[in-house]
Image (cartoon, rainbow, N blue to C red):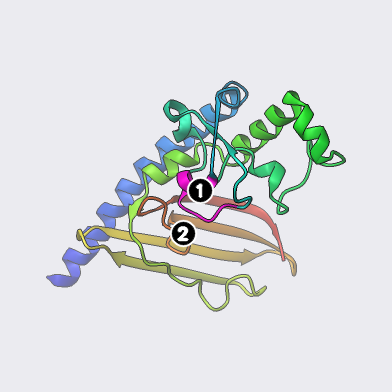
Amino acid sequence: MFGQKKMLNLLSSIVVWFFKAIALIFLTIIAFPLAPFLACFIVYAEESTLTGFPSLLPGTPRAFLIPALRIWQSPDAPVDEFWYSKDYSGFPKDGRTQADYDKSALLRWACRVNWLWRNAAYGFGAKFGYPYIQTLNDGPLWRTGVKCSYFWQVVNGLGQVGWCYKAEWFYTSTRYVEVYFGYKLMGDSINGKKFVAIQFNPFRTK
């Protein structure tokens, strides 16, 4: 009986996630044409005060969407992250200097649009997330170049079931399909929640 109840709770959680995923896909599609418009409505603030994470540039005000529109941006980073973070490159950033960025409103806008496209509708992904604080570790074979699949199931303090399925299926020696469904139990909690995960990438390379 206990095992049957546990299975029903998991199935219920998967059904709820499915409808969240459908809504999030729809919002993500909408986010792309909206991004050039959204990127015009900006306020500046210390990064840590709005994200809750340490500032990349302490003392330097960073760009955020205005409060009424902020759900359309990633809640864990400013919308100028594409420019300031060394982890990202490409158009319109490559070949341009900080002086170019400081004097060009068009370049700043274009970088914000790029970031909103890169993290389309992430605010909704967090809002639809699963309330859970603990961070789980990936399986031992994840990103080691070996075929693997893992499934995690957890229960939070409210009795709600959360789950995550991750897999890597190789179809050549270097290329593989990556699947990541459920909730990002391995990622940071944003406002006490784990992001909704909807990822199917058939073009990963090791």
> Sequence-wise, which precedes: disc 2 or disc 1?
1
- Separation of marks 2 and 1 at Cα, in angstroms: 9 Å
Crowding at label 2, few (<14), some or many (≥20) Cα neighbours within 10 Å?
Answer: some
The spot of residue 12 in percent (x, y) is 25, 52
Q: Residue at x 64, y 39 (%)?
A: 80
Three-letter residue code for mark 1: Asp
Residue 54 forms part of the magenta stretch:
yes
- Kindly identify which residue carries mark 2: 188
User: In this orientation, which residue lies closer to the viewer: 77 or 198?
Assistant: 77
Residue 22 forms part of the magenta stretch:
no
Q: Residue at x 59, y 39 (%)?
A: 61
- Give the farthest residue toward the front: 59
Q: Quadrant of the N terminus?
A: bottom left
Three-letter residue code for mark 2: Asp
Q: Which residue is drawn at 77% across and 34% down?
A: 101
Query: Across the whole image, how many numbered discs are drawn on residues?
Result: 2
- Kindly identify which residue carries mark 1: 76
Question: Magenta span covers which residues?
Answer: 47-55
Q: In this view, does 80 lie above or below 168?
A: above
The spot of residue 72 in percent (x, y) is 49, 33
User: In this orientation, which residue lies closer to the viewer: 87 or 103?
Assistant: 103
Is disc 2 placed on a helix, strand or loop?
loop
The spot of residue 191 in percent (x, y) is 37, 50
